[in-house]
Amino acid sequence: MVALTIPSIGRRAENTSPPSAVAEVMAGCSRRLIDQSLTARYSDWIAEALDEIQGCFLITDPGVAGHPIVFASHGFLAMSGYSREEVLGRNGRMFQGPATNRRSVLEIREAIREERTLQISLLNYRKDGTPHWILFHLFPVFGVDDGRVAHFVAVQVPIPRRSRSLSEARCGGARGRLFGACRNEVRSDCDLGCNLAADLFVDVDNRGLEAEESREASEQEKERASDAANSILSALTQYSKLTGRVVSSQRSRLAGISPLSSSLILSLGRIKQSFVLTDPQLPDMPIVYASDEFLSLTGYSRHEILGHNYEFLNGPDTEVEVLHQIRQSIQVECACTVRLLNYRKDGSLFWNLLHVSPVRNASGKVAFYVNVQIDENAKSDGLGLSPHMRQLGVVGAVKVAVRSLSLCAGPSRPSS
């Protein structure tokens, strides 16, 4: 994994090159996905409702490439020194710095992969570069309709510097007196920030910082974090009922449906091409994953297509013979490449250079089919690769993600 280089603690590197038209379009698509992340599931009033909740917290979407922040509370913005525009769409690694403990970040990463709640003390950095300690309380929010993780919520509660006497008592007797309250006297007395970058952690070198001991949260601070989490979950649940896409703190299981794990979704989100995964083990072989680029190409939102058969892109002028060719290749578990007339959500036509390939897990069984789309009229990728070579690259990346996950973490779908 490539480590992120931080040019200035707590500050973002500025891009001095002028934005291209392509970059502007990509930014617009990304912003649309971030906006839809909340409004499509919780209604247009959810941001206003969340703004009324006291506390410091972030909401992220593991279903969007890069696991970006899609909401930041007023309390968090005041604590971190960032504006909402600087935070939305970014990954939580922006709050890490040289003294952010790698082991703590790995614990958060595992909690995200396992889709479970976690409380942990964490050192992070404000925009002005000052470090601060927080109690980091992370929990997933599941969609009742499909059992997927809709969002992760990260509540942050400041852990202030303790008084010398209290710190000595916690360090214990002679050891506390020897180290002078666990060296809290050398730390700044400040509020705390946040880190939600567990999926792409910064591999920092903590040598030379080993004398720094983490601040432990008090029971009162843990209770504050839990109370804030309950308030946020209550608001999300209430407003999700308005759209009929209800969420819960517990995963519900629908008959025959096992959602993809967040870890696999995060891996797939790093593949920057238009593609979908379909599950041949489920009735009608529904779409179980769709890339951001596929949504941009077709005009559909993610919740409109997940669980549906891929053939919704077909229309009156789609050639039946080509569809028959695709179905035959799936029956014999072989790959095929075709040229197909498809329809976007707005009714416009495009010639789809479609490649369909089986994806096998570590045991050799076909776990998914990957459908890679290229608009025939789209510009090249700038690398001189043919459309078919680009498609094979996507297939290879998907196979690596599926097989690596099944080898390292068991089944690619949660078992509970």
Image (cartoon, rainbow, N blue to C red):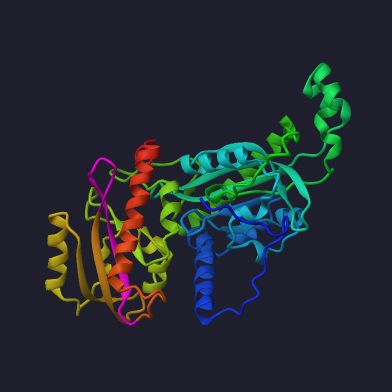
Nearer to us in this view, 73 or 165: 165
Looking at the picture, how far across and down is residue 277, in whole percent? Answer: 31, 57
- Chain part drawn in magenta: 359-377
Q: Dominant secondary structure of the magenta stretch?
A: strand
Residue 32: % across, % down? 51, 70
Q: Name the quadrant containing residue 384.
A: bottom left
Looking at the image, is 14 positioned above or below residue 116?
Answer: below
In this view, 61 is above or below 157 = below
In terms of image quadrants, where is residue 251? top left
Q: Within the magenta stretch, is there residue 251?
A: no
Q: Is residue 135 left or right of residue 252?
A: right
Q: Residue at x 52, y 63 (%)?
A: 39
Measuring 34% from the left and 73% from the top, which residue is drawn there?
385
The C terminus appears in which quarter of the rendering? top left
The answer to whether 401 is drawn above or below residue 120 in the figure is below
- Residue 310 shows in this picture: yes
Q: Residue at x 52, y 49 (%)?
A: 199
Q: Position of residue 407 (x, y in %)?
A: 35, 39
Q: How many marks?
A: 0
Q: Is residue 375 magenta?
A: yes
| Along the viewing direction, whichever of 191 and 22 lies nearer the viewer | 22
Q: Is residue 386 left or right of residue 183?
A: left
Would residue 288 be seen by someone viewing this image from the given angle? no
Q: Is residue 399 left or right of residue 52?
A: left
